[in-house]
Image (cartoon, grey):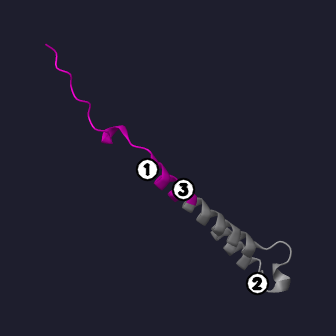
């Protein structure tokens, strides 16, 4: 994303209607940001869902020991 912003500035691409038509790195940077945002949110919610639905073995109650006579 940073490379797209730098490249757009170096190439003097504008944010006008005419400047945004065709190949434009400003729009590419926006798409990179949106993909990063949604990927991180999906990962966060997937981790929360996993933690809420699975019980790790270390948190299960111990089984009572059987007495042997």
| Label 1: which secondary element | helix
How far apart are the alpha carbons under marks 1 and 3? 12 Å
Left or right? Give the position of 62 relative to 54: left
- Residue 14 position within the rendered picture, expressed as x and y whole percent measured from the top left: 77, 84
In the picture, residue 39 is in which quadrant? bottom right
- State which mark lies toward you, 2 or 1: 1
How far apart are the alpha carbons under marks 2 and 1? 44 Å
Q: Which residue is mark 2?
A: 15
Counting the numbered discs, the total is 3
- Residue 35 position within the rendered picture, expressed as x and y whole percent measured from the top left: 65, 63
Identify the image quadrant of the C terminus: top left
Q: Which residue is mark 1?
A: 51
Which circle marks residue 43 in the picture?
3
Q: Earlier in the sequence, mark 2 or mark 1?
A: 2
Q: Is residue 9 above or below residue 4?
A: below
The foreground one among 37 and 28 is 37
């Amino acid at each position: 994303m940073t490379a797209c912003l730098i490249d757009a500035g170096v190439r003097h691409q504008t944010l006008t209607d005419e400047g945004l038509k065709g190949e434009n790195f400003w729009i590419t940077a926006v798409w990179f940001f949106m993909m990063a945002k949604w990927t991180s949110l999906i990962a966060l919610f997937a981790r929360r869902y996993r933690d809420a639905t699975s019980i790790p073995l270390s948190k299960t109650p111990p089984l009572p020991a059987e007495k042997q006579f």
